[in-house]
Image (cartoon, grey):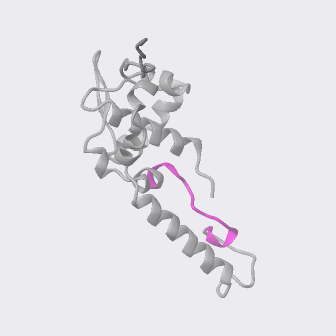
């Protein structure tokens, strides 16, 4: 299974907002941090807002932020909003299927188990987990100027 760019950047947008804490995050800043177009992020923002994964504040000083703690937003929450289909094979799709084994095929059962395991793993990870896994995320995203580690100073004897 391959996730879309929409899901990838939706997760990244939420990570940015989580790393930014209570401050409002602006789409141009998020776009610059990830090197993606603002238009693309605005497109992704709509389903995230409808699903309650981000909230928007309008106006000159507006932006986006997480409406609840990042620890309460799982990767599964994001994937189910941003992915259109989880059809791993023709037999997962709705409609007429040309396979005579569709009702008794072991492949269908195996793929369904694999998909359920995939969802279970996604439910076990939160946006907070992803942010905490990168101690310097704020620096990497340009959210704050952190001092780079300095080489230890040695004293001459």
In this view, 78 is above or below 154? below
Is 129 left, or right, of 111 in this rendering?
Answer: left
Note whether 38 is above or below 14 in the view shown: above
> In percent of the image, x 64 and y 77: which residue is there?
108
* Lateral position of residue 35 relative to residue 127, left or right: right
The answer to which of 83 and 133 lies nearer the viewer is 133
Identity of the residue drawn at 53% across and 42% down = 8
Residue stretch in magenta? 80-93
Seen in the picture, residue 101 relative to 20 is either above or below; the reply is: below
Quarter where residue 63 is shown: top left
Q: To which quarter of the image does residue 56 belong?
A: top left
The relative height of residue 154 versus residue 103 in the rendered view (above or below) is above
Q: Quadrant of the N terminus?
A: bottom right
As drawn, the residue found furthest toward the top would be 156
Q: Position of residue 130 (x, y in %)?
A: 41, 45
Residue 71 highlighted magenta (yes or no): no
Image quarter (top left, top right, bottom left or bottom right) of the C terminus: top left
Figure quadrant of residue 96: bottom right
Q: In the rendering, at what x and y percent does residue 88 appear?
A: 64, 65
Residue 126 is situated, as x and y percent measured from the top left of the image, at 37, 51
Residue at the farthest front position: 157
Q: Position of residue 89 (x, y in %)?
A: 68, 67
Q: Residue furthest bottom?
A: 104
- Side of 157 relative to 89 (left or right): left
Which residue is located at x 75 percent, y 76 percent?
98
Point 29% across, 24% down: residue: 58
User: How many numbered marks have been drawn onto this rendered protein structure?
Assistant: 0
């Amino acid at each position: 299974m391959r996730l879309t760019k929409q899901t990838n950047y939706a997760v990244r947008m939420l990570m940015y907002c989580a790393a930014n804490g209570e401050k409002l995050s602006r789409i141009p800043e998020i776009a610059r941090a990830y090197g993606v177009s603002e238009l693309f992020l605005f497109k992704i923002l709509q389903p995230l807002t409808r699903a309650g994964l981000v909230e928007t504040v309008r106006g000159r000083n507006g932006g986006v932020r997480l409406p609840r703690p990042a620890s309460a937003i799982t990767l599964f929450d994001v994937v189910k909003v941003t992915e259109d289909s989880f059809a791993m094979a023709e037999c997962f799709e709705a409609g007429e299927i040309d396979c005579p084994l569709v009702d008794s095929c072991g492949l269908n059962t195996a793929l369904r188990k694999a998909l359920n395991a995939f969802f279970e793993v996604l439910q076990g990870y939160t946006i907070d987990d992803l942010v905490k896994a990168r101690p310097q995320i704020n620096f990497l995203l340009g959210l704050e100027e952190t001092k780079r580690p300095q080489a230890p100073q040695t004293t001459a004897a």
